[in-house]
Image (spheres, rainbow, N blue to C red):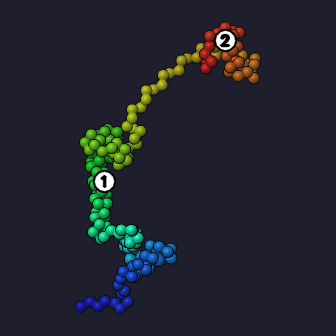
Amino acid sequence: MTETPENVQRWTAKRRSALVLSIIKGETSVAEAARKDGLTVAEVERWREHFLSGGENALRSRPKDEEALKDEQIAKLQRKVGELVLDIDILEGGEQGPPFRRGDVRRVKEVTGVSERRICRVLEVPRSALHDTPAAKPARRPLDATLVERIRQLIKRHPTYGYRKLWALLMFTDGLLVNLKA
């Protein structure tokens, strides 16, 4: 027969609530409480979560019974599982493993019918990669060498003139048909 040590204390509801209250009051942190009492951080967090949800339920004008709380939690977990299963389906829809490309996003979208935004988030493909790149800009027209030389002469002669005044000189004194942007 194994003997239990004398200094073992049971974690009664009263003792758990005292521990959680000390965490809520800021007297200790979750990690410190877990370390001090030989518990896991997850266990203490779960106690804290139950404590807070129970307190919230008790303060409702019409508190939910335990069955309703369990049903609510089951529904929440089912939604989460559904999302994770959907994410797995999306990841399996890619032709190869990572890195995924825009073809993978389109293929998964056709198969699953999930939104493009979600597929891109799961596959870590930027949504901008799905759109076709715009056509290249047309090349600039080559500059008219005589016009460039005339503009340089005018700038040397009138260094304080702006582009509008230079344009006016070209148009009205030289008689050249020039666009203001030229």
Q: Please, is residue 41 above or below residue 173 in the view?
A: below
First in sequence: mark 1 vs mark 2: 1
Could you tell me residue 60's position as x and y percent? Answer: 39, 68
Query: Pointer 1: what residue?
Result: 83
Q: Quadrant of the C terminus?
A: top right
Quadrant of the rendered image containing residue 5: bottom left
Q: Please, is residue 132 above or below residue 115 in the view?
A: above
Q: Residue at x 39, y 32 (%)?
A: 132
Could you tell me residue 156's position as x and y percent? Answer: 74, 19
Quick one: which residue is furthest to the left in this view?
A: 1
Could you tell me residue 142's position as x and y percent? Answer: 55, 17
Quick one: which residue is furthest to the front in this view?
A: 61
For the residue labelled by badge 1, is the local secondary structure a helix, a strand or a loop? helix
Q: Amino acid at mark 2?
A: Met
Q: Residue at x 75, y 19 (%)?
A: 158
Q: Quadrant of the N terminus?
A: bottom left
Q: Is residue 53 left or right of residue 166?
A: left
